[in-house]
Image (tube, rainbow, N blue to C red):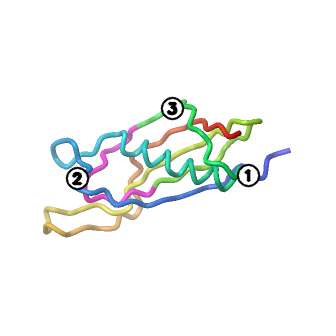
Amino acid sequence: MSDPRVGTTVTHRRYVHHGDAHYGGGLVDGAFSLKLFGDVATELCIRTDGDEGLFAGYAEVRFLDAVRAGDVLEVSAELVRVGRRSREVAFEARVVCRARPEVSPSASAALDPPLVVTRATGTVVVP
């Protein structure tokens, strides 16, 4: 019998500040997405187990496209497997808005469809 918590999803959105860029062209390091994955995993654990849990590790991380200063990122975590204490989680980060400096310094556009920039699977442990 399947655990009713499987399929639970948590989504956060975050503006990527120019101070978050570390590389030329306003590029942001991959660790930025991973930090946000930790945030959505924490809320997922709270919602499904009543505890913040601890991140045990990633089984896979794929950086599919660049994250840039001025982006609005949407990150989600979906509970895909429940063990006795471990939880397998699928993560995805998508750019939903992107700066358009070629138009003007403050121009931006909503992306439809969003641009998937990072996917990962990981394990969290709850008491």
**Cα–Cα span, label 1 and label 2:** 37 Å
What residue is disc 1 on? Answer: 5
Q: Amino acid at mark 3?
A: Glu
Residue at figure coordinates x 43%, y 36% from the top left: 62
Callout 3: SS: strand
What residue is disc 3 on? Answer: 60
Residue at figure coordinates x 20%, y 69% from the top left: 107
Among the two numbered marks 1 and 3 on one chain, the one whose residue lies closer to the N terminus: 1
Q: Amino acid at mark 1?
A: Arg
In this picture, which residue range is highlighted in magenta?
A: 63-74
Q: Nearer the viewer, mark 1 or mark 3?
A: 1
Q: Nearer the viewer, mark 2 or mark 3?
A: 2
Is residue 47 left or right of 77 when viewed as pictured? right
Could you tell me which quadrant the C terminus lies in? Answer: top right
Q: Residue 21: horizontal and vertical position, in percent?
A: 23, 48
Q: Are marks 2 and 3 in contact (CB under 8 Å)?
A: no
